[in-house]
Image (spheres, rainbow, N blue to C red):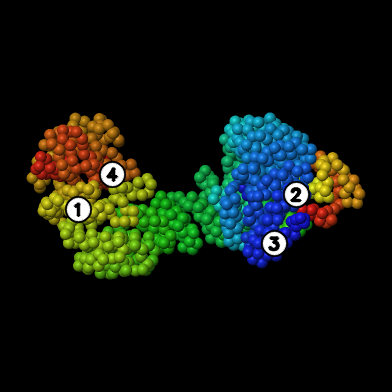
């Protein structure tokens, strides 16, 4: 068999291949030759063949059949074989391979070899890729070599020990004795690797950390020698003596000084010295300064030193080198939490970095700018950030927009500014805004009651300009639907009111429906907005026409909506005004999303939707009409009651309205109902005593009360404060029945005076079990921004023993804490 | 610690790969693909640092080769640039004005030099001279066995013009050994 071709020959041949297929062919041929050579157990050329295999492996071809051959090479006596064998092992035999462990014995023998280069090879292989079992087996050998006087071996053994500790942390103790005089070495290689070993041990074990704290003076001395010593040709890099070692020592000092005053004090001087004396013209000097700054910030340094560190970072920011600017921004981001004021001083430089051309720098500058925004600089910063949003790359826009929203929410100096900022973001980066910001924005707009007219006007104008940005369009159509009447009536205090007719508004909304730019979600918004305008505008016929057209739309969602709205026009016209009323104030939860009460997850109000999903109301409609007759005007206090979807008798859209003619002295209610609850629990109105009726309600110490107690039906109110908003009182009603028969079809309704807003959640059931066997609970939320005395009218309907019972009552014995 | 070091050409061909943690073969291929795409897409004058997963990627271009080093988050990026530069200097000293072809045809040497400079993801020797001397001594040791010698340490060997030299294997400082070989010495390396 002719001698296998040499490695270089093979490389040369493969490089002449002009196509991938040609290369593959050559490789396959050679692989075949190598395989047969391996089969022949040829010792002479094994090394050559494995080397060729490694080359082919680097090109991406499989080489696993060479694994055993590597083992044989390692076991060989020839140094060349060992060299290639260990290289092959490192490339092909990582710990996931089955034959990995077979190396252990060879490595063990080679660790005790008389030739240091062979020992070096073994240490290198073990330290790079030894598995945990191998480390366990050979840790003893490594520890022995750690104590040798041969610095070539000692430095490798130290790094090998680091690897062993990483793989098998329990073995850390074993290396402790050998570390005793590691730092007294003169050889820099050993010093460096020793510092790495000590760092690893300190990071993993607090005990070791405490133990090694005593080395701080020695480390400081070594560092000092490095700085003060003259030119050393062996370790010099651009005029600095062994920067790698300096950085490593600084890092170890950082770990040792972290929460320890004494150590930190011992390092103060040397850190100041390094910070002031290091040459900054080259990258290497800046690397050391960077590490010094990180150390100063982490230990308990004195304030002068910290200021020095931040100033170094400030200088970095002005450096021409991009890498250094990047590093400065990253470090400032880390320190902005702790040294906020110091970083604020560099704000203008940071904001300038927003205009840098480099993408990584821009990103860091953006993050840092958001971290620096506070109540004082919000206006200026926002101007810069909005300018950045205009001109930045698309990859930044989403993050920048979210950041702007968050910052605006936290620090907005005025509502108008807030709305303006949001408008600006929506118009410039509208398509990059995150999906969940649409409901958040809607919530925000709803809550700024006095800005409704201004907002809807601005949104309308924005819509006229551009309908391509979906989040903007969605928010705008929602607002127009809600506040279209304000838009048309032209009342706006903040700005010049514009003249808009109802037809123009409907034109715009219909335009959205037909436009190709609108997504299905946006179309849904537009359709619902048009529908809502049917109660606010007078051109109902036009709206009816639009809605009926979409009853045959291809889009299922639109079709469903249109059909249901159509039904509203036809069969449930009496319910329409109630359903399409203004949305109540939405409460914000901690997670920045609306609560379950009103789920505006981009869709229409579910309270409206759910009611449409209900089967027809069985309660006589004239009853609803009677109540509505009490209306007599537009001042409706909305009570949208969410109901259980399966409740057939729910008055989903019924409105209880008891108006402003609810006089303070509690005059006789118009309905023929006996007045108010009689029994007054003894602990009422005391204000301070809180003897809760039910164990679970002890919150805020507001005493519960009985609101109604008649004919066997007793209704108790228990109170809580809603956490985020102290103006909202959460009342849970507990209805119990002491008669012998169940009360079925139980419906509880409530109304409050105009200055309040009220929301009813779904009741737990509509059957109140007899003989106090259970209670029906329902949650009411009352918003009381003006902190007036809480009063409520309630209406109860139920069926008892076959006959329907209805009762109206007034509740005004609320404890003062519930509304104060 | 450093996680991996990759060298690849401007066309994305891999010239050297050093992994300091065990990673499955398929994932290695994916990482190589990701790195080459990311680094080759960078603008010429942008900063040399990237973020990838939980690692920092430091890359630098030297002539037609990209050096790509991945370090953990707490490491010093500016120093990583120095590490790359030091490795290039070592290659340059060894090969004499190193170019990509040297690394292609002598990839195993590039690995050997790397293994004298880095170990287990950390720097093992900060002095250029010491690393160079170690490599050259190892090369000489290898040299002895190119001509079919099967004994090991302690043998004397005639070397280049009859100068008898004790094998350098027992001492670290190699001051006594003259590297007289020059090119001839290097060309005799190619016994594999």
Q: Mark 2 lies on which chain?
A: A
Question: Would you name the residue on which mark 2 appears?
Answer: A42
Question: Would you name the residue on which mark 4 appears?
Answer: A728
Q: Earlier along the polypeptide chain: callout 4 or callout 1?
A: 1
Q: Which class describes the residues within 10 Å of circle 3: few (<14), some (14-19), or many (20+)?
A: some
Q: Which of A648 and A232 is in front in this view?
A: A648
Residue located 64% across and 43% down the image? A99
Q: Quick check: marks 4 and 1 in contact, CB under 8 Å?
A: no
Residue A703: quarter of image: top left
Residue located 28% across and 44% down the image? A728
Q: Earlier along the polypeptide chain: callout 3 or callout 4?
A: 3
Element assignment for label 4 = strand
Distance between the alpha carbons at the discs numbered 2 and 3: 24 Å
Q: Nearer the viewer, residue A252 or A559?
A: A559
Which marked residue is nearer to the observer: mark 4 or mark 1?
Answer: 1
Question: Would you name the residue on which mark 3 appears?
Answer: A14
Question: Would you name the residue on which mark 1 appears?
Answer: A615
């Amino acid at each position: 068999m002719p001698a296998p071709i040499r490695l270089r020959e093979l490389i040369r041949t493969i490089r002449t291949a002009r196509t991938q297929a040609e290369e593959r062919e050559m490789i396959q041929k050679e692989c075949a030759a190598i395989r047969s050579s391996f089969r022949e157990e040829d010792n002479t050329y094994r090394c050559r063949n494995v080397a060729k295999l490694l080359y082919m492996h680097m090109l991406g071809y499989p080489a696993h059949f060479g694994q055993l051959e590597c083992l044989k090479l390692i076991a060989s006596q020839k140094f060349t074989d060992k060299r290639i064998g260990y290289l092959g092992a490192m490339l092909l035999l990582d710990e996931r391979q089955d034959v990995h462990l077979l190396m252990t014995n060879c490595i063990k023998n080679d660790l005790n070899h008389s030739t240091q280069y062979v020992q070096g090879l073994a240490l290198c292989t073990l330290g790079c890729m030894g598995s945990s079992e191998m480390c366990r087996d050979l840790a003893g050998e490594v520890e022995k070599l750690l104590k040798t006087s041969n610095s070539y071996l000692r430095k490798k053994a130290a790094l090998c020990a680091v690897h062993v500790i990483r793989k098998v942390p329990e073995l850390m103790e074993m290396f402790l004795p050998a570390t005793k005089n590691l730092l007294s070495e003169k050889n820099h290689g050993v010093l460096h690797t020793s510092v790495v070993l000590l760092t690893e041990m300190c990071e993993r074990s607090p005990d070791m950390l405490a133990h090694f704290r005593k080395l701080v003076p020695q480390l400081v001395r070594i560092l000092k020698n490095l700085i003060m010593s003259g030119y050393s040709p062996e370790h010099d890099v651009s005029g600095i003596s062994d920067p790698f070692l300096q950085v490593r020592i600084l890092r170890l000092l950082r770990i040792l000084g972290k929460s320890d005053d004494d150590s930190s004090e011992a390092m103060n001087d040397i850190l100041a010295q390094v910070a002031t004396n290091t040459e900054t013209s080259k990258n290497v000097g800046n690397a050391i300064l960077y590490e010094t700054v990180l150390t100063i910030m982490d230990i308990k340094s004195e304030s002068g030193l910290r200021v020095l560190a931040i100033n170094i970072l400030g200088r970095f920011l002005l450096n021409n080198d991009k890498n250094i600017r990047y590093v400065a921004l990253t470090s400032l981001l880390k320190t902005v939490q702790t040294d906020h004021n110091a970083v604020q001083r560099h704000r203008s430089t940071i904001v300038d970095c927003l205009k840098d051309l480099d993408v990584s720098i821009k990103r860091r500058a953006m993050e840092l700018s958001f971290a620096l925004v506070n109540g004082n600089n919000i206006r200026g910063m926002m101007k810069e950030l909005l300018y950045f949003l205009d001109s930045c790359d698309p990859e930044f826009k989403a993050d920048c927009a979210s950041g702007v929203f968050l910052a605006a929410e936290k620090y907005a100096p005025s509502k108008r500014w807030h709305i303006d900022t949001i408008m600006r973001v929506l118009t410039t980066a509208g398509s990059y805004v995150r999906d969940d910001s649409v409901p958040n924005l809607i919530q925000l707009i709803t809550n700024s009651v006095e800005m409704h007219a201004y907002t809807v006007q601005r949104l309308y104008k924005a819509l006229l300009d551009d309908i391509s940005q979906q989040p903007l369009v969605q928010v705008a159509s929602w607002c127009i639907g809600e506040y279209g009447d304000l838009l048309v009536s032209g009342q706006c205090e903040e700005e010049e009111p514009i003249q808009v007719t109802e037809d123009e508004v409907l034109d715009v909304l219909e335009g959205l429906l037909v436009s190709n730019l609108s997504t299905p979600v946006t179309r849904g918004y537009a359709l619902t907005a048009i529908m809502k305008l049917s109660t606010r505008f007078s051109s109902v016929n036009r709206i009816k026409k639009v809605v009926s057209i979409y009853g045959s739309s291809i889009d299922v969602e639109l079709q469903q909506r249109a059909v249901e709205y159509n039904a509203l026009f036809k069969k449930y016209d009496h319910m329409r005004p109630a359903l399409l009323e203004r949305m109540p104030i939405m409460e914000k939860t901690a997670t920045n999303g609306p609560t379950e009460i009103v789920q505006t997850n981009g869709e229409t109000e579910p309270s409206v939707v759910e009611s449409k999903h209900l089967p027809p109301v069985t309660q006589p409609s004239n009853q609803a009409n009677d109540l509505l007759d009490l209306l007599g005007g537009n001042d409706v206090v909305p009570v949208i009651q969410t109901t259980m979807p399966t409740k057939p008798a729910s008055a989903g859209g019924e409105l209880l309205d008891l108006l402003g003619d609810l006089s303070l002295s509690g005059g006789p209610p118009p309905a023929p109902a006996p007045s108010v609850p009689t029994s007054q629990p003894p602990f009422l109105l005391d204000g301070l005593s809180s003897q809760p009726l039910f164990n679970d309600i002890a919150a805020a110490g507001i005493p519960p009360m009985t609101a109604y107690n008649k004919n066997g039906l007793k209704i108790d109110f228990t109170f809580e404060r809603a956490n985020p908003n102290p103006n909202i009182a959460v009342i849970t009603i507990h209805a119990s029945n002491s008669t012998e028969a169940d009360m079925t079809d139980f419906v509880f309704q409530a109304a409050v005076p105009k200055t309040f807003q009220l929301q009813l959640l779904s009741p737990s059931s509509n059957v109140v079990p007899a003989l106090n066997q259970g209670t029906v609970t329902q949650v009411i939320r009352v918003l009381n921004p003006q902190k007036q005395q809480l009063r409520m009218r309630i209406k109860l309907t139920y069926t008892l023993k076959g006959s329907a019972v209805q009762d109206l009552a007034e509740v005004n014995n609320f404890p003062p804490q519930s509304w104060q | 610690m450093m996680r991996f070091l990759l060298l690849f050409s401007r066309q994305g061909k891999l010239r050297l790969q050093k992994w300091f943690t065990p990673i499955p073969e398929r994932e290695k291929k994916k990482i190589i693909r990701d790195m080459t795409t990311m680094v080759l897409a960078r603008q010429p004058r942008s900063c040399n640092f990237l973020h990838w997963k939980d690692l920092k990627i430091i890359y630098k271009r030297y002539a037609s080769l990209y050096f790509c080093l991945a370090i953990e988050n707490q490491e010093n990026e500016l120093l990583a640039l120095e590490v790359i530069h030091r490795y290039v200097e070592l290659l340059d000293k060894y090969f004499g004005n190193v170019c990509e072809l040297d690394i292609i045809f002598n990839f195993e040497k590039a690995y050997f030099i790397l293994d004298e400079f880095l170990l287990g993801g950390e720097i093992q020797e900060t002095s250029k001279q010491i690393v160079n001397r170690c490599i050259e001594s190892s090369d000489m040791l290898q040299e002895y066995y190119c001509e079919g010698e099967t004994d090991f340490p302690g043998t004397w060997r005639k070397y280049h013009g009859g100068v008898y030299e004790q094998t350098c294997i027992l001492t670290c400082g190699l001051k006594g050994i003259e590297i007289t070989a020059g090119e001839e010495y290097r060309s005799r390396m190619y016994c594999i």
